[in-house]
């Protein structure tokens, strides 16, 4: 049972990657926070900016901190992540569909 830390399956980041990821994460947090606190923007623009920065934040976290990419070492992690996203999407869409169906039948 060897503890080889140089195996091909272990993809660790370096200080530069973590620093870039941290700076991007902070920027993607400050942008919507500043817009909300300034109060000079419409509700639609705020919701759009918050949604876009939230998706960008997730992608930054996945790439810079979890090191998920298209390499062969990360294939199973990416497959598990996609499966999780699909399961959550099915759960959410199915729940909304059922609630809409129940609402429609209660109004008849």
Image (spheres, grey):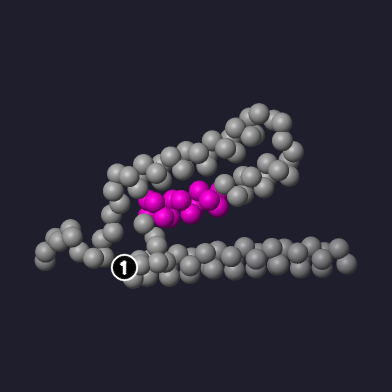
Residue named by callout 1: 73
Task: Determine the main secondary structure of the stretch shown in magenta.
Answer: helix
**Residue 30 placement (x, y as % from top left):** 54, 35
Where residue 18 sits, quadrant-wise, is: top left
In the rendered structure, the answer to whether residue 48 lies left or right of residue 70 reads right
Nearest the viewer among 20 and 34 is 20
Q: Indicate the position of residue 77 as horizontal and vertical percent values.
A: 38, 66
Relative height, residue 54 to residue 29 (above, below)? below
**In the displayed structure, does residue 7 sit left or right of residue 107?**
left
Indicate the quadrant containing the C terminus: top left, top right, bottom left or bottom right: bottom right
Badge 1 element:
helix
Numbered marks: total: 1
Neighbor class of circle 1 (other Cα within 10 Å; few <14, some 14-19, many 20+) is: some
Q: Is residue 19 magenta?
A: no
Q: Which residues are magenta?
A: 54-66
x and y percentages locating residue 102 in the rendered image: 76, 66
Q: Residue furthest top?
A: 38
Which quadrant would residue 100 be assigned to in this image? bottom right
Q: Residue at 63% of width from left, 34% of height from top?
A: 35
Per the image, is 56 magenta?
yes
95 horizontally vs 82: left or right: right
Q: Which residue occupies 72% across, 63% down?
A: 99
Look at the image and tell me in which quarter the N terminus lies. Answer: bottom left
Residue 42 image position (x, y, % from top left): 74, 38
**Residue found 58% across the figure and 35% down from its top:** 33
């Amino acid at each position: 049972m060897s503890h080889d830390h140089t195996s091909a399956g272990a993809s660790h980041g370096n200080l530069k990657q973590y620093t870039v990821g941290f700076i991007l994460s902070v920027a993607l947090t400050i942008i919507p926070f500043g817009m909300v606190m300034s109060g000079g923007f419409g509700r639609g623009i705020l919701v759009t900016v918050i949604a876009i920065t939230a998706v960008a934040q997730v992608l930054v976290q996945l790439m810079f901190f979890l090191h998920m990419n298209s390499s062969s070492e990360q294939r199973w992690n990416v497959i598990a992540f996609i499966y999780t996203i699909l399961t959550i999407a099915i759960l959410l869409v199915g729940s909304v569909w059922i609630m809409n169906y129940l609402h429609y039948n209660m109004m008849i």
